[in-house]
Amino acid sequence: MQNPIIGHQQIVEQLQRTVASDRIAGAYLFYGPEGVGKETVARYFAQLILCQQGAQPGSPPVIGKGQVCGTCLACRKVDSGNHPDLQFIRPEGSLLKIGQIRELQKQIIYEPLEARRKIYILADTERMNPEAENCLLKTLEEPPAASVLILLTSNIQALLPTTRSRCQILQFHPMPTQALAEILVNKFSVAPDQATTLAIAADGAIGKALTQLEKGDIHTESVPEILKETNLLAAFKLAENFKDNPETLNELVTWYRDLLFLQQGAPSELIAHVHSLDELRAIVPRYSRLRIQQAIQTIFDTKSLIENTNTNATLALEVMCLKLLK
Ligand SMILES: [Zn+2]
């Protein structure tokens, strides 16, 4: 069966070799931005380990071959979420609690039921409080031989250095937005102009892009009004839009960045919004380099103000729009 993972080729090949040579470590830490594919790869890694391709009924479990067959009983159980030797542990409410870690420790000492290893995937481990993390450390220090722990996090700095040092660390990177846009077009039949917008809004994280796609939350790319608008009264309407969709501030930056690139005569591969190239070229002469740089700075400042302080978001966005229109 073909490897079903999109991107992360090096990591996938590394894990395949690890399983084929039966050199599986006791603990792994996968880190990278939300929606980038950590959990998908962790599940695939588990399936690599658990796959019983070629095993005879009644005989002891075999060592994984570094491939997933997709058809053996073990593979089908992983696919349906019913493999008894694979457990997912996720935060209950907002925290990964000490009770959950204790429960894991109670179970992990028993032999696997059907495979040679039992695997625990711990999602969002940055949400462990210190008690839970210290408790988990005991298992990380001496993991039972037949177990594999896979910790996932989008914020590695939130974990203790001792936790990190006990794990094999794999870093997951987002895709370049153009590459992600192409995948969305070719594999998910997204219209090209929508794919670019979606890829940028998702910061190159395919999981995020697919979630938005599922929600039907996509719009056809069009040059934001604020780049064209000169009427100050329009600022208040624009601020309202940003307040309802705060994630569009990141996207707005990419438009100003395109203006900056065009003004500097950068090659068109660098332009994110290629479908609006003509319109952007028509707008560029209205802007000085300084004004574009100030606009980008203003957006970042406003974003930081809203995220990190108790400031009134509506007011901050109105001020931002007025500055951008100036
Ligand atoms: Zn299989």
Image (tube, grey):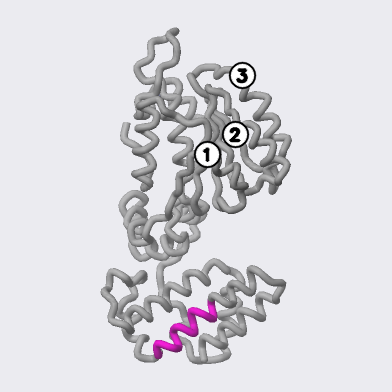
Residue assigned mark 2: 140
Q: Are marks 1 and 3 in contact (CB under 8 Å)?
A: no
Which comes sooner in the sequence, label 2 or label 3?
Answer: 3
Residue identifier under label 3? 110
The location of residue 213, given as percent across then percent down, is: 46, 55
Pick out the residue farthest to the left: 267
Query: Marks 1 and 2, how far apart in space?
Result: 8 Å
The one nearer the camera, 180 or 153, is 153
Identified by mark 1, the residue type is Cys
Q: Amino acid at mark 3?
A: Tyr
Q: CA distance from mark 2 to mark 3?
A: 16 Å
Task: Please indicate whether residue 210 sits to the left or right of residue 54 in the image.
Answer: right
In this rendering, is residue 125 above or below 273? above
Judged by its main secondary structure, the magenta piece is helix
- Residue 277 position by quadrant: bottom left
Q: Residue at x 35, y 25 (%)?
A: 65
Magenta range is: 288-299
Q: Is residue 69 visible?
A: no
Q: In the rendered view, tell whether residue 187 sits above or below residue 122.
A: below
Q: Are marks 1 and 2 in contact (CB under 8 Å)?
A: yes
Vertically, is 297 above or below 192? Answer: below
Element under disc 3: loop
